[in-house]
Image: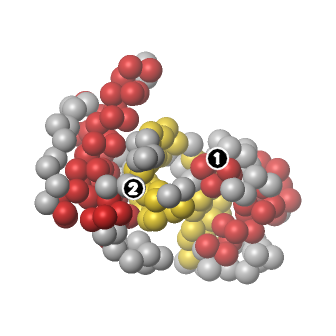
């Protein structure tokens, strides 16, 4: 995908995400640029940042609905249904930074043990899905910025999935994925 096409897709996704949230506050919608990818299945995560801190993050790990629908629904969910936060308020919306990550199809990792799995992780490139015993958690590649060491990243991911940091089982499944991401600028 060319840089111009990529930028156009990013703009289209960001505007749709912001409009989806703004519609809950009766905000005037911005004009939404079109892009052919919006009609295709796509998986996004929408991350909201307020004053440099996480304010919501919800997404899809698999492409099962049109990209246009996916980004809108995940934007509303990140703003109003992330269980870690109270619903976004109108006074916060005017200052919130929106980030949209478009996920590539996850690829299963094959490993012999935890050390082998850790050795396969690519910091700052891989998003990782951890699955075991019916529980699942994921970290986007952006999480490497705050957890740059693979062991630290992995231990926090296990905790997010509902396990102890030192948990390991032969039934663990891991998947990695890459993202393309775009974000709005911080409001002054």
Q: Is residue 182 left or right of residue 42?
A: right
The earlier-in-sequence mark between 2 and 1 is 2
Label 2 SS: loop
> Label 2: few (<14), some or many (≥20) within 10 Å?
many
Picture coordinates of residue 26, whole percent (x, y)? 13, 60
Label 1 SS: loop
Taking the spot 78% from the left edge, 63% from the top edge, the residue there is 152
**Residue indicated by mark 2:** 96
The one nearer the camera, 120 or 125, is: 125
Between label 2 and label 1, give the one nearer the viewer: 2
Labelled disc at residue 55: none
Q: Is residue 98 left or right of residue 165?
A: left
The one nearer the camera, 114 or 83, is: 83
Taking the view exactly as shown, the residue that stands out farthest to the right is 115
Q: CA distance from mark 2 to mark 1?
A: 26 Å
Q: Is residue 66 left or right of residue 95?
A: left
- Asked if residue 86 is positioned above or below residue 24 in the image, the reply reads below
Taking the view exactly as shown, the residue that stands out farthest to the front is 188
Picture coordinates of residue 58, whole percent (x, y)? 42, 63
**Residue indicated by mark 1:** 126
Classify residue 184 by image quadrant.
Answer: top left
Asked whether the viewer can see residue 111, the reply is no
Picture coordinates of residue 59, whole percent (x, y)? 42, 59
Taking the spot 43% from the left edge, 41% from the top edge, the residue there is 185
Taking the spot 73% from the left edge, 63% from the top edge, the residue there is 154
Q: Quadrant of the N terminus?
A: top left
> Label 1: few (<14), some or many (≥20) within 10 Å?
many
Asked whether the viewer can see residue 10, the reply is yes
């Amino acid at each position: 995908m060319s840089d111009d096409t990529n930028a156009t897709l990013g703009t289209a996704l960001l505007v749709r995400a912001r409009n989806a949230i703004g519609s809950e506050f009766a905000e005037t919608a911005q004009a939404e640029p079109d892009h052919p990818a919006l009609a295709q299945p796509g998986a996004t995560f929408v991350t909201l940042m307020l004053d440099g801190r996480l304010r919501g993050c919800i997404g899809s790990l698999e492409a099962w609905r049109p990209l246009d629908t996916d980004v809108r629904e995940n934007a509303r969910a990140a703003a109003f249904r992330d269980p870690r936060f109270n619903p976004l308020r109108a006074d916060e919306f005017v200052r919130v930074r929106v980030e949209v990550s478009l996920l590539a199809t996850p690829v299963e990792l094959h490993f012999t043990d935890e050390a082998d799995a850790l050795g396969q992780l690519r910091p700052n490139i891989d998003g990782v899905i951890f699955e075991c015993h019916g529980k699942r958690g994921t970290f986007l590649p952006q999480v490497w910025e705050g957890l740059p060491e693979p062991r630290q990243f992995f231990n926090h991911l296990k905790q997010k999935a509902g396990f102890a940091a030192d948990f390991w089982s032969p039934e663990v499944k891991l998947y990695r994925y890459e993202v393309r991401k775009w974000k709005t600028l911080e409001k002054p």
